[in-house]
Image: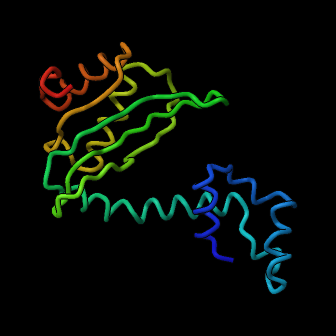
């Protein structure tokens, strides 16, 4: 059973990883391919490990790709809370590559353990910008008009040494 195709299907349809643990799901590959054994069907925890491994493998090439951007790297970010009260911060990078193609890449989607304060958002954004060595490539930052984003911009402008009015 191709674990990458299964992982792609789960992510594309925004399904929980544990759906593959259900008997109803596991019957499908067993029925469609009699040579498949129960132990060959990956469980949810296996798929999570696979996704984390793939993410780690992609970081190096992604870092290199961002360094070769023709333009500055511009950012959008927003915090949100799921129906299950899990908080996340989505951070996207926007840039033009060497072939003049526009890109929008999700750089990070960390869980927020604290409230969506401006300082907490700024810490996550700054950590991600630094992890990708983009401190000297920061272009504009586009955010919604929530008051915590003003605080985040104040913190980011201090951290990276730019005037918030010139980048926001």
The image quadrant of residue 168 is: top left
Residue farthest along the front direction in this orientation: 101
Q: Is residue 142 left or right of residue 46?
A: left
Determine whether 89 is above or below 155 in the image.
below
Residue 154: x %, y % from top left: 23, 19
Determine whether 81 is above or below 2 in the image.
above
Q: In this view, does 53 lie to the left or right of 85?
A: left
Q: Which residue is drawn at 14% across and 49% down?
A: 71
Q: Residue at x 73, y 63 (%)?
A: 43
Q: In this view, does 119 lie to the left or right of 14?
A: left
Q: Residue at x 39, y 63 (%)?
A: 58
Residue 164: x %, y % from top left: 17, 22
The image quadrant of residue 17 is: bottom right
Residue 79: x %, y % from top left: 45, 28
Q: Which quarter of the rendered picture does the N terminus lie within?
A: bottom right
Determine whether 154 is above or below 66 in the image.
above
């Amino acid at each position: 059973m191709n674990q990458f195709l299964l992982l792609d299907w789960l992510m594309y349809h925004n399904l929980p990883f544990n759906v593959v643990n259900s008997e109803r799901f596991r019957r499908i590959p067993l029925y469609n391919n009699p040579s498949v054994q129960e132990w060959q069907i990956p469980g949810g925890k296996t798929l999570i490990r696979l996704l984390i491994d793939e993410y780690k493998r992609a970081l190096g090439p992604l870092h290199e790709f961002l360094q070769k951007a023709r333009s500055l790297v511009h950012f959008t970010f927003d915090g949100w809370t799921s129906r299950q009260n899990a908080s996340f911060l989505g951070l996207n990078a926007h840039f033009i590559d060497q072939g003049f193609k526009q890109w929008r890449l999700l750089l990070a989607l960390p869980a927020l353990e604290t409230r969506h304060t401006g300082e907490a958002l700024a810490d996550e954004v700054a950590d991600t910008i630094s992890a990708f060595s983009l401190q000297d490539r920061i272009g504009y930052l586009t955010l919604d008009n929530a008051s915590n984003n003003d605080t985040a911009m104040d913190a980011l402008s201090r951290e990276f040494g730019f005037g918030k009015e010139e980048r926001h």
